[in-house]
Image: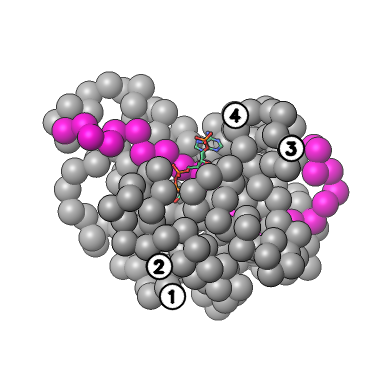
Amino acid sequence: MNILITGANRGIGAALLTAAQGRGDTAMGTVRGAGHDTLLPLDVRDPQSCAALAGRLSDTPIDLLVCNAGVYLERGMAADALTDPQLWADTFATNVTGVYLTTMAFLPHLRRASAPKLAIISSQMGSNTRAKGQSYIYRASKSAALNLGRNLAVDLRSEGIPVGIYHPGWVRTDMGTSAATIGTDESSTGLLQRFDALSMDTTGCFEMWNGDAMPF
Ligand code: NDP
């Protein structure tokens, strides 16, 4: 199975890449910037970067596209101090626009696969049901990523491309911090099982890494 994972140079993306390669998949990971030995260059905010990698992959079918790259730029900032519009723009450029640009760039490659799937890494912080206050920008961006995934699921249904949206757990990464409850191995192993289970029967799902349903 050919898998493309964005933001695979560290954190959950790197663990997903290792786990997928370890079980025999042909997994490709991306990194911001050029010149990496094993990872492919991709800045998900940049349409030209997306187009360049899509062109480089040419007619390679992609069975599973994992939109994992994300940022949490307001860490440590008070909720009433998020007044810099650039902070909102930069967060949405990666967490929302980046998902859209990535999906559109590699949709032709998904269409070449016999049983293609699209996975979007959102967060429980994108759940409206579980709104807990604070981190307004990140929460809004992950909610938008969830909404984007739900609408892509509708529009890609006729092509037989299921779309799953996922919460990876609170994971010990640079973003999740060392205080998080699970490691990258547990998260990535669980997520791969969720991707395997994704089908047209479950398209549009919002699930945790362990298979529990996330409330929208
Ligand atoms: P990290 O901060 O550890 O890693 C983020 C990855 O995304 C890095 O590889 C980073 O690359 C990449 N990235 C950021 N911006 C871009 C961009 N513009 N183009 C390409 N790649 C980019 O985060 P995690 O591994 O913890 O998170 C992965 C995903 O899981 C994110 O979407 C996050 O929101 C989500 N998530 C994480 C949780 C957690 O507890 N860790 C909880 C819920 C959701 P670079 O090194 O260049 O910055």
Q: Which mark is residue 37?
A: 3
In the image, the residue with mark 4 has its CB under 8 Å from the nearest atom of ligand 1: yes
The answer to whether residue 57 is magenta is: yes
Residue located beneath label 1 in the image: 211
In this view, 131 is above or below 45: below
In the image, taking residue 136 as reference, residue 5 lies left or right, namely: right
Disc 2 designates what residue? Answer: 208
Kindly tell me whether residue 104 is visible in this rendering.
Answer: no
The image quadrant where one finds the C terminus is bottom left
Which corner quadrant of the image does residue 57 belong to? top right
Quarter of the rendering containing residue 64: bottom right
Chain-order first, disc 4 or disc 2: 4
Camera-side residue of 115 and 73: 73
Q: Nearer the viewer, mark 4 or mark 2?
A: 2
Q: Are marks 3 and 4 in contact (CB under 8 Å)?
A: no
Image quadrant in which the N terminus is located: bottom right
Magenta range is: 55-78
Mark 1 beta carbon near ligand 1 (under 8 Å): no
**Contact, CB < 8 Å: mark 4 with mark 2?**
no
Which secondary structure, mark 1? loop
* C-alpha span from label 2 to label 3: 32 Å
Which mark, residue 46? 4
